[in-house]
Structures are given as C-alpha cells and as structure tokens.
Amino acid sequence: MTDTPINLDSLRQRIDELDSEILRLISDRAECAKQVAEVKTASDSGAVFYRPEREAQVLRRIMELNPGPLNSEEMARLFREIMSACLALEQPTKVAYLGPEGTFTQQAALKHFGASAVSMPMAAIDEVFREVEAGAVNYGVVPVENSTEGVVSHTLDSFMDSSIHICGEVVLRIHHHLLVADTTLRDKISRIYSHPQSLAQCRKWLDAHYPRAERVPVSSNAEAARMIKSEWHSAAIAGDMAAKLYGLEKIAEKIEDRPDNSTRFLIIGSQRVPMSGEDKTSIVVAMRNQPGALHDLLEPFHRHQIDLTRLETRPSRTGVWNYVFFIDFKGHVDEPRVAAVLEEVRLRASELKVLGSYPVGVL
Ligand SMILES: C=C(O[C@@H]1C=C(C(=O)O)C=C[C@H]1O)C(=O)O
C-alpha cells in the first residue's frame, strides 16, 4: 500500500466534495428537463416527450468529449441512465418488449431506454406491434437480425401489415451460458432447453461437450431457464438476465460459437424521428416479377452513392408480387439525396413503404 491513512482520508474528502457537485449538477439538469416538458406541453397538446434524435446527439457528444480514464461506452451508459431518469420526470415511458422477463429483448430495452422506463413483457412479436398501434405503450422493442442466424422473419412480416414506424435501433452482444439449478445432477444432463436461435448459435459447442444430450427448442431462453428448475437432469442455455432472474448457476460461460455474436433490435413507435446527424432508413419495396428487378431497384442507390447496410428478401403474401425487399441504408428521408433516390425507386416499384428514419445505434 502506497496510500498513507492521511492520503486516503483526503482523497475520500475530495470524492465527497465531487459527489456533492455531481449531485447539484444532476439536479440542475433534471430541473431543465422538467422545464423542457413544460415547453413541449405548451407548444403542442399531443407533445412527444421522448426524442430519440436528441438523445443520440447527447450520447455522441458525451463520447466525443470524454477525457477518460473511463471509456466512452461506460461514460455514455452513465449518461444514458441520467437521461432516462430525466425523461421519467417529463413522462414515464412505457415500453413493450418480446418477453418473458429475462430475455435478451428485455436487456435491449433496458440498454436503449435506461432503468427508469417501465417495461412490459409480451408473449409474441405481433403483440408488441399491437400494443404500440393501440397506444397502450409508447414504444416497443423487437429483435430483427442476428449476426449468426440471420433475420427474425416474424418481425419483418409484422411490418408488412402495420403503420408502425421504426424510431431507433440497438445492437446487443449476445453471450450464452449453460445454466443449471441447485437441484440439477450436473453429470447426468440429458436434455438442454433453449430458444431455437440460441441452440443454433451454440451448435458446435454442444456437439463438442454434450453430443448425446437432447436439444429441446422452447419459446424463449427465459422459458428454458424457468423449466429446468423442476427437472434434475436438464440444463438451459440463456443469458445473464435469465440466470439472475431464476437464480441459476453458470456451469459454462460464453458458449456461443462466434465471439462476435450479436443481435440487432428495433425500437418501434408511432412518431417520425427528425435527423440526428447520423441516421439510417428502413424501407420495404415490392417489385414486379420480371428479369432485372433487383438490379433496377438497387441501381439508384449505387448512382447516388448511398450505403446499403442490409438487404433482405421475403416472399410476398399477396401472391401478385413475387419479391418483397427489406432495405436498410445510411441516411435520413429528410436529406435531399435520399428523397431523390426514394422518388426514383417509387417509380420502379409496385409498392414502397418507408418504415422509418432513425439514429444509428449509439450504445
Ligand atoms: C430534455 C428533453 O427530453 C428528453 C430527455 C432528454 C435529456 O435528458 O437530455 C433528451 C431527449 C428527450 O428524450 C429534450 O427533448 O431535450
């Protein structure tokens, strides 16, 4: 130990002084947020309190200004919570997510809205859409693509029949663990429960370590975690939230086959989000079934040098049009070059729907 007791005391005194200052500053900030709410309410009776573009700008600015020693992500996470608490003073934000409790989607909701939001588990993706459409909640969180397993087709399909907008995105690193209860006989594990996507993401690890165990797909990782509490020969694959929620022990950590395994989630709502300075747009396009349709669709993006970040094909359910494309690209519909591309695409497509322009995920 290099610190003498005197040094330790004076350092702690300094920390107390700093904490008092931080406390005062956070309180001043919260007062400001309350006043923002008054301004919003005065200028618009249907005021929207949560402003994704502004929150993205606040977080990006903090990350840019961060002098260290805390890393920028850590610092942004702290500010994420401060903003979450400030927004709750304006209006408590209600968020529906694909449940049950303990899923990665809940973790994504928490990461995006912070701990002061009120989050509500839904049993299925289309229920999340319905709750948002009915106005029962302010926003919804649904998974859309996984880096190992690809697209979550339920989510894309739900957009086809909905007037919902995409208001944001959040990307989560997904770590899977093999979990057991205190009653599990660890050397007798003959059955492993998890969501089919998670079983697929851990396929090689399971082949190597539990080649003979039966792999049982269930509706969610959290459900898997819940089920093994009553079965002495079963284990579950799930994440940290489910492990904590059901008091399970990790007997193997981070068993996903790819270390960069991540899932992208969408924030859905009924508002159009203004430009944040670094945005993405998602559209769905139906093309006539004719040769060169995909080329015709993509050519204007190439000519206007717009970056495509994702292209997904889904079978059209109307039967008349054979191709439906989901396209994500960099840029916002309010930018003239994006508006120009969309105008051209509209002429070539049989249908074009803009699902939303929203800030590129910050955290
Ligand atoms: C304070 C505002 O309202 C909310 C709270 C924010 C904050 O705490 O910084 C930012 C955006 C909004 O979600 C605002 O719109 O500026």
Image: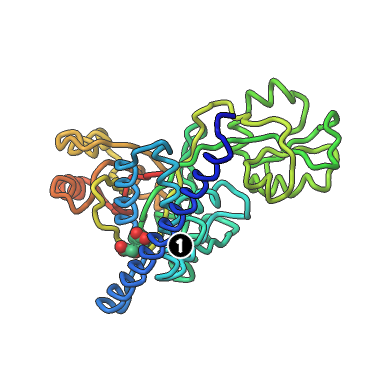
| Picture quadrant of residue 98 | bottom right
Q: Horizontal and vertical percent for residue 323? A: 35, 42
Of the pair 11 and 125, the residue shown nearer to us: 11
- Residue 308 lies, with reference to residue 21, above or below; the image says above
Report the side of 283 relative to 170 (left or right): left
Of the pair 13 and 35, the residue shown nearer to us: 13
Report the side of 203 relative to 44 (left or right): right
Using a 10 Å C-alpha cutoff, classify the residue at mark 1 as few (fewer than 14 neighbours), some (14 to 19) or many (20 or more).
many
Q: Horizontal and vertical percent for residue 232? A: 85, 40
Q: Horizontal and vertical percent for residue 248? A: 74, 43
Image quadrant where one finds the C terminus: top left
Which amino acid lies under the numbered mark 1 shown in the image of this protein?
Answer: Ala
Name the residue at 46% across, 69% down. Answer: 92
Name the residue at 77% across, 39% down. Answer: 180
Q: Horizontal and vertical percent for residue 50? A: 37, 63
Q: How many marks?
A: 1
- Residue 12 lies, with reference to residue 214, above or below; the image says below
Image quadrant where one finds the N terminus: top right
Looking at the image, which residue sits at the far front? 6
Q: Secondary structure at mark 1?
A: helix
Name the residue at 58% across, 35% down. Answer: 175
